[in-house]
Amino acid sequence: MKSFRQYLKEQSSPINDEWFQHKDTIIAFKPPKPINYEIAREAGVVETLEGPVKHEAGHAIVTGPKGEKYPIAPEKFKALYDVVEESPGKLTAFYGTATPKRILKQVRLADHDGVLKTSWGDLNYKAGEHMIVRHGPGDYGAVERGIFDQTYEKHNPDISAAPQSPHESVQRAAPEHPIFGQSPHESVQRAAPEHPIFGINSSAYKRPDV
């Protein structure tokens, strides 16, 4: 008799943009809960929950809700987070706190075991244990299910929420999506003053009056 995992593996397909065109795909985003980060002084390797990931000097090393760490390139960090506070550190160039921007993403529970090949390393995932997040065309990440539940919220299109960031970004779900009806590559970003490290000046931000 086949196990449930064997059955899922036989029914699964490779993870690509088409894999997310499925009835089980949801739309989710990270709420603006502060996270801690450090800016690496030199290149190295971070042992993430999904495997070792290399980073370069200047990359942000983010700490998750369970103490897990993962590196993010400066340009991606700038696109995903608003810097709240930062200070010079002894072991790293800077450390501080930031809040995620409200970016809608497609998410689906992994239906097979596998490895995501990314530019920063290989991410291992398991069926039923990891959520696969589509950050953009051909750009995916794996998040342990328990951590996903702590760091993401399901988007409710019936609730009109105020922007969580003064330069809120929105990534639409898919072509002819029943909710959005927009291109998956469409995004809206509002500019902000330049920051000396990331190009963002967090001290200039004020929540817009609503």
Image (cartoon, helix red, strand yellow):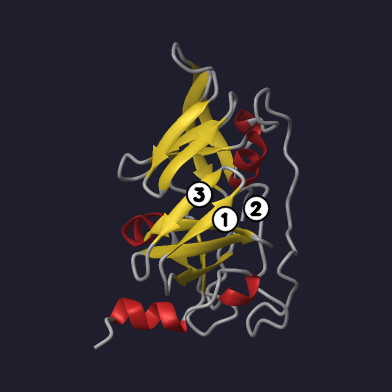
Q: Secondary structure at mark 2?
A: loop
Q: Earlier in the sequence, mark 3 or mark 1?
A: 1
Q: Which residue has dot 3 on it?
A: 122
> Is 89 left, or right, of 5 in this rendering?
right
Residue 25 is situated, as x and y percent measured from the top left of the image, at 51, 76
Q: Secondary structure at mark 3?
A: strand
Q: CA distance from mark 3 to mark 1?
A: 26 Å
Q: Which residue has dot 2 on it?
A: 168
Tell which of 77 and 142 is nearer to you.
Answer: 142
The amino acid beneath tag 3 is Asp
Q: Secondary structure at mark 1?
A: loop
Q: Tell me whether circle 1 and circle 2 mark residues in contact (CB < 8 Å).
A: yes
The quadrant of the picture occupied by the N terminus is bottom left
Q: Residue at x 34, y 45 (%)?
A: 65
Q: Residue 199 appears in which quarter of the rendering? A: top right
Q: Residue at x 48, y 64 (%)?
A: 132
Q: Residue furthest bottom?
A: 1
Q: Which residue has dot 1 on it?
A: 102
Q: Earlier in the sequence, mark 1 or mark 2?
A: 1
Q: Residue at x 65, y 47 (%)?
A: 166
Mark 3 is surrounded, within 10 Å at the Cα level, by few (under 14), some (14 to 19) or many (20 or more) other residues, namely some
Q: Disc 2 vs disc 3: which is toward the camera?
A: 3
Q: Disc 3 vs disc 1: which is toward the camera?
A: 3
Tell which of 180 and 163 is nearer to you.
Answer: 180
The amino acid beneath tag 2 is Glu
